[in-house]
Image (cartoon, rainbow, N blue to C red):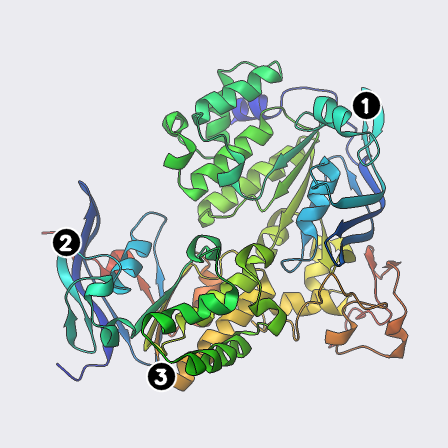
């Protein structure tokens, strides 16, 4: 299945020390679909996102992108492959480098892949417009903006390499209703135009039902224990 | 859980239910920055009654948290506060939180009579003390038995064995429950809870909200500052909607959620995933450059020339107030 259009976690098992968090989990995220993922606190939802985002190597099982198995994590993965997946996390304060202006925060992944500077500036302006960051906000650093504004910058950063798969781990949990609806609308638009696959994790059942095409229960995605 | 109530609400003189506990009168807060002034709270008046759970909701940056910090005297040095906020209690003289001075606030008011559940628990906890030690200190300072620590932990949904952990060993949600327990320890007559459910999953959110609700049913009062409209709808008696430093609508919870009068309140409710899931059109104004009239007018579908005059809070049908020249009348479609 080399032409498969999906991000796949195949029978993934992950533990921290002796504690097994994911035990043979299989989750398939297809291009063009939005999948909701639910499960109680501590069931391993965030660990699964870290595995799918190529930030954590599973103990067993593997991740494949459009049929290509991924070996290793982070910088060990070729740029062309790892930029296909992006993640947006719950706390932008913890995710964003406090020393960078919002514009530099968005630009960093482009500069890290040696994109020419004129292209970087053009792309940053385009994304900042997309997520609704005014010119004034782009020059500010994280301490001078609200959580909602910072999360919009993190969303722009996540989209900067035009990923085919976007993972949202409680990405709107700390946002007010209006900002939540705005962030969700930007992600949905991107999902439609790019035919991207979007994984949404939330404790909010109403939000999951409204936002996703189908909902996966993490317990049900776990292999029955022999 | 009878023991729960005996610990989290020991018998102390309370204002009779329904009597005003806190009256805020034309409160204003400004921050002086190098080249500009930020108006974070403007002409804000409200009353919190004993037994009442008031929720303050609004978009981020509307001034909700600044209001909490102003009442507690925790604003930074570049802030100027105007107006009054009087705390009434049966056994003591009424105290004006704005004018009484830091010394009085620190010794007599903060923590004891007016509690705060702070917004970011990670920065509010002393990193070199375990949860048990932090709780014991607070209990002792308020003349209570340190053994109550375990029961307080249970009340907020924290496993007592987790009390022996240091703050960095706690998850965000555990730290949140610990600061809630710390705020409840002195049993304040009025508790201000600033986003007390951040980082908690749904069952714990409900647990925390029910705990706050029970305090009110026992005659205390709670001001719940939240961005979570569903939480406000679940437990609040009244809801105040803040927009750009002002309260634009203050109504009974049911009335606000069924028939909002202010166009902003209506637009905010439409952003909920179980309603239209549509963001409020446009961007919130900068607090450094608020328009002279209604601050919502540039985003408002109902604006007219009259909106260049600032609307005052006015009674609306069914009770409560809304600050709008063109409120949505009950039964109207827009």
The numbered dot on residue A198 is none
Asked if marks 1 and 3 fall on the same chain, the answer is: no
**Is there a contact, CB below 8 Å, between mark 1 and mark 3?**
no
List the residue tagged with mark 2. A59
* B194 lies above or below B115: below
Residue A190 position (above or below residue B271): below
Task: Name the chain letter of the residue that bears numbered label 3.
Answer: A
Name the residue carrying label 1.
B90
Choose mark 2 or mark 1, whichever is in front.
2
Residue shown at the point (56%, 36%) measured from the top left: B211
Quadrant in the picture for the C terminus of chain B: bottom right
Distance Cα–Cα, label 1 vs label 3: 64 Å
Q: Nearer the viewer, residue B282 or B104?
A: B104
* Whether residue B334 is situated above or below residue B322 in the rendered picture: below
Instruction: Kindly indicate the quadrant of the structure image that contains residue A160.
Output: bottom left
Q: Position of residue A79 (x, y in %)?
A: 25, 73
Which of the chains bears the disc numbered 1? B
Q: Is residue B249 visible?
A: no
Q: Secondary structure at mark 3?
A: loop
* Rendered view: B175 above or below B273: above
Q: Secondary structure at mark 2?
A: loop
Q: Chain of mark 2?
A: A
Image spot of residue A177 (x, y percent): 58, 63
- In this view, the residue in front, A139 or B120, is A139
Crowding at dot 1, Cα within 10 Å, few <14 / some 14-19 / many 20+, comes out as few
Q: Are marks 3 and 2 on the same chain?
A: yes
As helix, strand or loop, the secondary structure at mark 1 comes to loop
Is residue B280 found left or right of B156 in the rendered image?
A: right
The image's mark for residue A195 is: 3
């Amino acid at each position: 299945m080399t032409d498969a259009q999906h991000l796949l976690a195949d029978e993934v098992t992950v533990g921290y020390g002796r504690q097994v968090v994911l035990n043979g989990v299989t989750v398939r995220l297809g291009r063009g679909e939005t999948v909701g993922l639910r499960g109680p606190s501590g069931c391993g939802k965030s660990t699964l996102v870290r595995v799918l985002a190529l930030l954590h190597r599973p103990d067993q099982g593997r991740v494949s992108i459009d049929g290509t198995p991924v070996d290793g994590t982070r910088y060990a993965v070729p740029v062309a492959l790892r930029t296909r997946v992006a993640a947006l996390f719950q706390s932008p304060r913890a995710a964003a480098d406090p020393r960078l202006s919002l514009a530099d925060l968005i630009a960093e992944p482009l500069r890290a892949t040696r994109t020419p500077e004129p292209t970087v500036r053009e792309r940053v302006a385009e994304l900042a417009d997309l997520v609704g960051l005014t010119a004034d906000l782009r020059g500010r650093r994280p301490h001078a903006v609200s959580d909602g504004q910072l999360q919009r910058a993190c969303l722009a950063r996540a989209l900067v390499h035009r990923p085919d798969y976007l993972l949202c781990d409680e990405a709107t949990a700390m946002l007010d209703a209006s900002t939540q609806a705005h962030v969700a609308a930007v992600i949905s638009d991107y999902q439609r135009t790019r035919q991207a696959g979007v994984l949404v994790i939330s404790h909010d059942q109403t939000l999951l039902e409204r936002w996703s095409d189908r909902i996966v229960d993490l317990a049900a995605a776990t292999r029955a224990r022999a | 859980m009878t023991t729960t109530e005996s610990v989290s609400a020991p018998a102390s003189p309370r204002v009779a239910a329904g009597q005003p506990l806190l009256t805020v009168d034309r409160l204003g807060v400004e921050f002086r920055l190098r080249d500009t002034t930020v108006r974070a709270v403007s002409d804000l008046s409200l009353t919190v009654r004993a037994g009442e759970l008031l929720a303050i909701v609004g978009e981020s940056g509307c001034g909700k948290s600044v209001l909490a910090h102003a009442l507690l005297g925790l604003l930074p040095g570049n802030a100027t506060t105007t107006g009054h906020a009087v705390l009434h209690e049966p056994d003591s003289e009424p105290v004006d939180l704005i004018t009484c001075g830091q010394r009085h606030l620190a010794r007599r008011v903060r923590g004891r009579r007016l509690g705060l559940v702070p917004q970011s628990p990670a920065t509010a906890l002393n990193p070199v003390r375990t949860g048990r030690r932090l709780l014991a200190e607070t209990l002792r300072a308020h003349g209570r038995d340190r053994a109550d620590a375990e029961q307080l932990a249970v009340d907020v949904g924290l496993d007592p064995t987790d009390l022996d952990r240091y703050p960095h060993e706690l998850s965000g949600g555990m730290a949140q429950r610990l600061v809630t327990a710390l705020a409840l320890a002195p049993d304040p007559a009025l508790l201000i809870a600033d986003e007390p459910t951040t980082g908690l999953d749904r069952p714990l959110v409900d647990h925390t909200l029910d705990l706050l609700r029970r305090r009110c049913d026992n005659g205390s009062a709670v001001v719940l500052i939240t961005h979570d409209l569903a939480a406000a709808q679940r437990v609040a008696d009244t809801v105040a909607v803040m927009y750009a430093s002002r309260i634009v609508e203050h109504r009974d919870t049911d009335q606000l959620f069924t028939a909002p009068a202010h166009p902003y309140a209506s637009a905010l409710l439409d952003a909920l995933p179980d309603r239209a899931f549509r963001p409020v059109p446009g961007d919130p104004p900068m607090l450094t450059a608020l328009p002279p009239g209604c601050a919502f007018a540039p985003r408002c579908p109902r604006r007219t020339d009259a909106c260049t005059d600032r609307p005052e809070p006015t009674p609306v049908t069914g009770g409560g107030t809304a600050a709008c020249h063109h409120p949505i009348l009950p039964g109207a479609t827009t």
